[in-house]
Amino acid sequence: MHKSKFSLIIMFIYIILLSQASFAESPRSFKVVFDESHFLQGWPVWDTSFFGKSKLATCLMDEGYIVDVNTLPLDKIINDLGKGDVLVLSEAVNASYRPGEIEAVREFVKRGGGILVISEHDNSVGMSDFQKGIVANYGIHFNNDAIRITEEKAIKQKHTWIKASSPFLKMENIGLFCSASLTYDKDVNPLLVVRDENIKNGEAVAGVYKKHGDGRIIAIGDSEFYWNGGIIYGQNKNFTLEIIKWLSGEEVKKTIPADYNLFTANEMEITLYSEEILTPEISGGTVNLVKQRKNKSVWNIKVEKDGWVRFVSDKGMAVVYFLLPKNNEGMKFLIDESHYARKADASLSGLYKMACFLRDNGILTFSSSSGSYKEYDAVLIATPLEEYKRIPDLSSSKRIILLGEFHLALEGTDSICRSARKMGFEKLGDPLNDIAANFGMTFSRFALCKDDNIFFEYPVYKGCIVGYEKNNFDVWIKGDEKCWGEDIGSGMISPLTKGENDLSDTTIMIANDRILASGDTDIFTNAHISESQDILNRIIIWLKK
């Protein structure tokens, strides 16, 4: 057999094995999974603009939850979720869940899962109909009405947000922008109540809750309350965290900081920063305490095979993944998890499988949220969610990979934004673009698509255009005559045609001798990496040249 054909067969087999890799033995942490399996389903979790959910994501991480995003059909992933996990089902544009997905959600709730179902105040683009099949199983119905205050009242209070209360959570001053009311069966309970003289009967229910077997359901008729621009209103942040906690029904432990969250070595010393006594549990090796101080402890881990070690205290938990190296020498690669960037964990949107792929190609891969870049030959930064304060440190890196996602740009132009600014909302930063600007690049605020799940020469899920200074970069992935884009400015989806808005030369991935930038992160995640064989091989060549 020809050598090149044999190599292709071996790589094909490897990709199949990688896609089938199981995390069944992974340490148990509770997840909040945001479903984005339909195009324009809710606004993105990784988006730091007004309409994104990055503030909510960082709050949940601080509480100890694993924040995950799903881009696959629900019935393909939901069996990996269990009691204590929460599935967030946001509104979507002109889409629907298949019967198999609705049944999968029902089974998830039956075995103890929690679901947060979000709708909107009308059905102009099918947002209300989208969730009907899910909530009908629990005697809940979203009405196609709009609970809103009068123009006179909006002028008087200088914003258009509605005040709601939650008798169940004993909370007042919860802000909704414009909500649907809900009707519901007798065994369902009101969660959010709006009282206003201009509402029919003076009162409307904008959210409900229900226990169903071991599972729990909350349905709310408004999506703005947990956006970056809405979570600042009154008690919205506390309210959102409380409903997630109730849906989980489990005590979530805070994350204990460790100097490494993933490493590739036969043996490694790991430092954990906690004043509490830690109990370790390991799969794939042995672990021993080396030294204990007041606020930190050092542990020696000997690796026998790929695995993990979980450190648990009364209030906290840390999980460290480890990979057995192919050899003990080679390029050192860092996945930077600081600033709430994407993690090399076992979640759907995590980068654990990418770390495995790099290891299998002789690259010693690590992930950390602290430490220096100087000891690494290459650094990867994916979708950081807060202002990036380590840009000067990147000057020592020989190779840098920046991974972005599509996000939005209605800052300051939309009436919702203007209304929120009067409540104290400040325009959020754009951490990834702050980094990119130092290298002559920009990640545009634009959703670039092709068909339903966009596929270019290489598979890309939902991405943004990466702009760059001419002649400084090679284009690795670009659009063609069939791709189209969302005109974020007006919020409408429309194909962009040849001419001024021609997308055939738009770039999604670019590289030069030092920097590689991708407008899509999904293709490198655990959920999609099996589709990305060609581009991964090209990255290995780029890293090693």
Image (cartoon, rainbow, N blue to C red):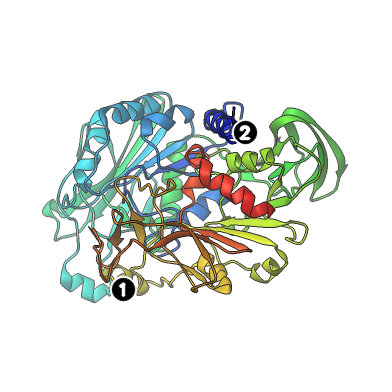
Q: Report the Cα–Cα distance between label 2 and label 1.
A: 62 Å
The image quarter in which residue 112 lies: top left
Which residue is painted at 68% across and 71% down in the image? 392
Outermost right residue: 291
Quarter of the image for the N terminus: give it: top right
Which residue is painted at 19% across and 60% down in the image? 148
Image coordinates for residue 433, horizontal then vertical, percent? 51, 68
Per the image, the residue denoted by label 1 is: 418
Outermost front residue: 2
Q: Label 2 is placed on what type of residue?
A: Lys
Number of numbered discs: 2
In-front residue for pair 395/177: 395
Q: Is residue 66 left or right of residue 494?
A: right
Quarter of the image for the C terminus: give it: bottom right
- Say whether disc 2 or disc 1 marks the residue closer to the N-terminus: 2
Q: Residues within 10 Å of mark 1 (few under 14, many from 20)?
A: some
Image coordinates for residue 312, horizontal then vertical, percent? 69, 36
Image coordinates for residue 57, horizontal then vertical, percent? 48, 52
Image coordinates for residue 518, horizontal then vertical, percent? 50, 57
Mark number, residue 3: 2
In-front residue for pair 487/147: 487
Callout in the foreground (2, 1) = 2
Which residue is painted at 70% across and 63% down in the image? 397
Q: Is residue 121 left or right of residue 70?
A: left
Mark number, residue 460: none
| 345 is higher (above) or lower (below) than 369 | above
